[in-house]
Image (cartoon, rainbow, N blue to C red):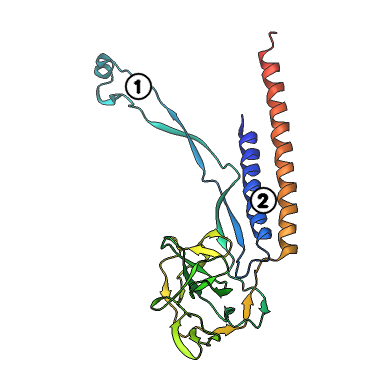
Amino acid sequence: MFRGIYAGTSAMLVQEKMLDVVSNNLANVDTSGFRGRVAVNKSFPEVLMDRVERYAIVDEAMNEELHERKFFPYVRGRTSIGTMPLANVMSETAMSLDRGPVQLTDNPTDVMLHADGFFVVEDGNGNTFYTRSGHFQRNNLGELVTHEGEYVMGDGGRINVGEASRISIGESGQVFADGDLVGTLQIVDFENPTYLHNVGKSLLAETPESGGPVALDGAFVISGALERSNVQVVQEMVRMIEANRAFEASGRAVTIQDELSGRLFTSVGRPS
């Protein structure tokens, strides 16, 4: 009776989550290295509606009368009386692997990855994250950090450039301070990077689905440039309009179903 309400409500929830994803993408359109996320919807698994049979109480005398055609009690079985697919549900969000446009900065501590891979960074609590953003700078302790303050990790740990007046980063990720090699950027990749979890702006965390990080050999780093966000503003605006219209249509469907149900209850419950 209420399948229409369930289907409409399910659709409204999907569009609400869709708007959340689009809003987050648009909010990070100017975040370097940010990769937008795409909402993945799937059909709700078919729900079996079972009817539980009552215990059949059969007298022994009846079995004796039936002789060879004995009727044994049917003990609590289930008979399928139909299926009900409840429209769509929000299954997950996946990270888009499209590369963002290049922005030249001429800043020697700004770097971008020419191909796949992620820089490894660490926060003050020792938590490891991954990012495509190479917008690095030096903190007051001479350590190489991200624009948000996370420590940039090298093959030997944190990279310290001290008070060097000239910092440069080579094509293979080597970090030089006044001509001396002080570290090499740690660059990794994942088996399924689209399943990395976004933990804020351009920071990503591994998940069981993404697999663990694997050192990326032969990574090519471009100095003096940044990878901008790969979010397409026009495309996201179209998705927002579609989600809003779908939400409104689903809401009207729920309202209509509710009105029809009210009329049905009034008609059936009215004494003749």
In the picture, which quadrant includes the C terminus? top right
Could you tell me residue 261's position as x and y percent? Answer: 68, 25
Establish if 237 lies above or below 150.
above
* Amino acid bearing label 1: Tyr
136 or 241, which lies in front?
A: 136
Is mark 2 in CB contact (under 8 Å) with mark 1? no
Could you tell me residue 204's position as x and y percent? Answer: 51, 63
Mark 2 vs 1, N-terminal side = 2
Q: Say whether residue 5 is left or right of residue 116.
A: right
Residue beneath disc 2: 19
In the picture, which quadrant includes the N terminus? top right
Q: Residues within 10 Å of mark 1 (few under 14, many from 20)?
A: few
Residue appearing at x 70%, y 50% in the figure: 243
Spatial CA span between label 2 and label 1: 50 Å
Residue beneath disc 1: 55
Q: Say whether residue 38 is left or right of residue 248.
A: left
* Amino acid bearing label 2: Leu
